[in-house]
Image (cartoon, rainbow, N blue to C red):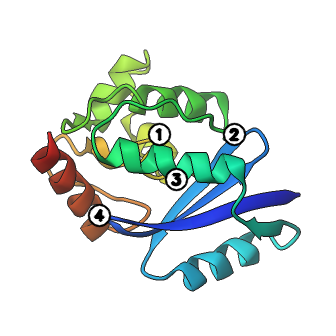
Amino acid sequence: MQLTYATVRTPAGTALVVATPRGVCAIQLGDRADGLLRRLKKAQPDIRLRRGGRLVRAAVRALHAYLHGKAVKVPLDVHGTPFQMKVWLALRGIPRGQTRTYAQVARGIGRPTASRAVARACGANPVAILIPCHRVVRSDGQLGGYRWGELRKRALLRYEQNAT
């Protein structure tokens, strides 16, 4: 499969933005672009990556706009279980600068006892920031886990709260 990619600096470090012809399929966060690219190629050795491209450039512009508080619609090409897709859609409805608990998200999707499953769906989210799993915290107010690390989660939340 041919994918296009770009890297961009964010308040949470370097983001690797990856797109198919249908939309953004991944945004990964890390310290260095080369490390992110190596991790992606190791996880999916059969993909072909090309830097740039119309869709990924548009996605980077949208990511910048999103980080600066503008509402943007970015086509996504993500795949998951029906439950994961429902959770990811709910996460996109959490307003910038706000958080919800895993339990609140579970209740919001009609699965009030599924807060742990919501946490697992957040951990499986392939598109950091645009599907804002960083906005979901534990019921006791603690940050909880984050696929890209607690420091990145904290940085994104602080950035959004200061920029609103």
Amino acid identity at mark 1: Ala
Judged by depth in the image, the label closer to the viewer, 2 or 1, is 2
Rounded to the nearest whole Å, what is the CA distance between mark 4 and mark 2?
Answer: 24 Å
Amino acid identity at mark 4: Pro
3 and 2 marks in contact (CB < 8 Å): no
Residue at which label 3 appears: 60
Residue density around tag 1, few if under 14, some if 14–19, many if 20 or more, within 10 Å: some
Residue 117's tag is 1
**At 29% across and 43% down in the image, what residue appears?**
135
User: Is 124 or 103 nearer to us in this picture?
Assistant: 124
Classify the position of the N terminus by image quarter.
bottom right
1 and 3 marks in contact (CB < 8 Å): no
Judged by depth in the image, the label closer to the viewer, 3 or 2, is 3
Residue density around tag 2, few if under 14, some if 14–19, many if 20 or more, within 10 Å: some
Amino acid identity at mark 2: Asp
Disc on the earlier residue, 4 or 3? 4
Residue at which label 2 appears: 77
Task: Label 3: state its secondary structure.
Answer: helix
